[in-house]
Image (cartoon, rainbow, N blue to C red):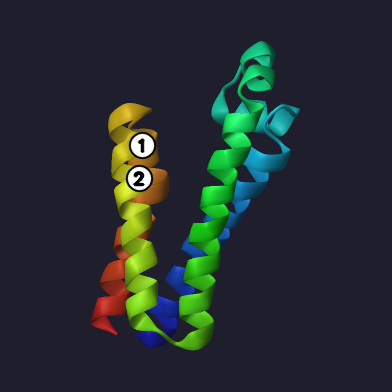
């Protein structure tokens, strides 16, 4: 069970690393605009805000990687909890898709960590 929990935590970390890349470096590029369904003018006007969001996603990914590499379950649970809260807030304020893309995987990983 520990291997499954570690895999799930790693996948959540990888997801947030991917989001970092999308928000910090690809926001105004075709892939970033496609993923977030952005008009070119809006993407350009909001790129600094998106980079800031990307940085925070990087902190989440780094915290999860730290928890994994150090074998610290409390650190893993803390950062997974942060992802769940961010996902629930994003679902309530931006779109329900965020609940399934961000919060649900983190909640599943959290359950796996607790079960392991």
Instruction: Name which residue lies at 48% across and 75% down.
Output: 7
Read off the residue under disc 2: 87
In the image, residue 40 sits, relative to residue 87, either above or below, namely: above
On the image, the x and y values in percent for residue 95 come to: 36, 29
> Is 25 on the left or on the right of 11, as rendered?
right
Residue 45 horizontal/vertical position (percent)? 65, 18
Quadrant of residue 115 within the rendered picture: bottom left
Residue 41 x, y percent position in the rendering: 67, 12
The number of callouts visible is 2
Residue 12 seen in this snapshot: yes
Q: Looking at the image, is 44 positioned above or below residue 3? A: above
**In the rendering, at what x and y percent does residue 73 appear?**
35, 81
In this orientation, which residue lies closer to the viewer: 83 or 96? 83
Report the side of 3 relative to 108 (left or right).
right
Quarter occupied by the N terminus:
bottom left
* Marker disc for residue 90: 1
Does dot 1 land on a helix, a strand or a loop?
Answer: helix
Report the side of 47 relative to 103 (left or right): right
Quadrant of the rendering where the C terminus is positioned: bottom left
Answer few, some or many: residues within 10 Å of disc 1's Cα (few below 14, many 20 plus, some between 14 and 19): some
Point 69% across, 20% down: residue:
44
User: Is residue 104 visible in this depiction of the protein?
Assistant: no
């Amino acid at each position: 069970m520990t291997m499954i929990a570690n895999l799930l935590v790693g996948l959540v970390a990888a997801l947030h690393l991917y989001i970092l890349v999308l928000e910090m470096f690809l926001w105004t590029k075709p892939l970033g605009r496609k993923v977030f369904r952005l008009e070119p003018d809006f993407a350009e006007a909001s790129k600094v805000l998106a980079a800031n969001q990307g940085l925070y996603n990087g902190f989440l990914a780094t915290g999860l990687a730290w928890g994994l590499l150090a074998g610290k379950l409390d650190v893993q649970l803390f950062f997974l909890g942060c992802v769940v809260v961010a996902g629930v807030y994003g679902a309530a304020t931006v779109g329900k898709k965020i609940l399934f893309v961000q919060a649900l995987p983190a909640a599943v990983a959290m359950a796996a960590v607790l079960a392991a």
